[in-house]
Image (tube, rainbow, N blue to C red):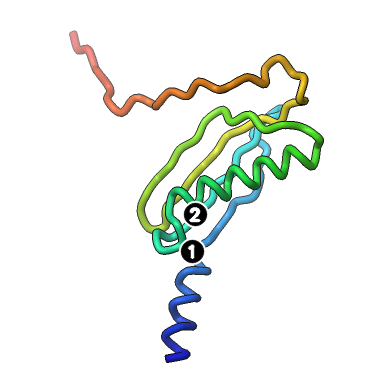
Amino acid sequence: MKIIILMFLFVILTGCVSSGVLEMGPNTYTITVQRPPMAGGVAAAKGEAMKEAKDYCANQFQKVLVQRYVDQPGYPSTSSITFMCLNPDDPELQRPHYRSDPNVIIETRP
């Protein structure tokens, strides 16, 4: 029985991976988190990515502004967030208006 429990915990814990905060350019960062479905899947991955982004910006006494997010369900489920850290009085720090990326490409041929 102990072996089964240890194997179950190993499967859950080994699927929890984070890239950490990576700098993409001037004041632009990205983070990717993976979670297996039995450890919360996409929802847990997105929550962890947001927490890490907020913590990173808070350490600089700034607020996080998410620019883009991409969720990929599956095994493991993945959530990637691209964000900026802005001063609380920065005029760019406004409520974001997200749009989905197009999933259809229309090609016009002569």
User: In the image, residue 92 lies at what x, y percent?
Assistant: 67, 17
Q: Quadrant of residue 108?
A: top left
Q: Amino acid at mark 1?
A: Gly
* Residue in the picture at 80% in, 37% down: 60
Q: Quadrant of residue 81?
A: top right
Would you name the residue on which mark 2 appears? 34
Residue 94 is tagged as none
Residue 15 versus residue 78 in the image, above or below: below
User: In the image, residue 90 lies at what x, y percent?
Assistant: 74, 18
**Which residue of the protein is positioned furthest toward the top in this rendering?**
110
Q: Earlier in the sequence, mark 1 or mark 2?
A: 1
Which quadrant is home to the N terminus? bottom left
Q: Residues within 10 Å of mark 2 (few under 14, many from 20)?
A: many
Residue 91 versus residue 19 in the image, above or below: above
* Residue in the picture at 51% in, 42% down: 80
Q: Is residue 78 left or right of residue 95?
A: left
Q: Is residue 97 left or right of residue 65?
A: left
Q: Nearer the viewer, residue 100 or 5?
A: 5
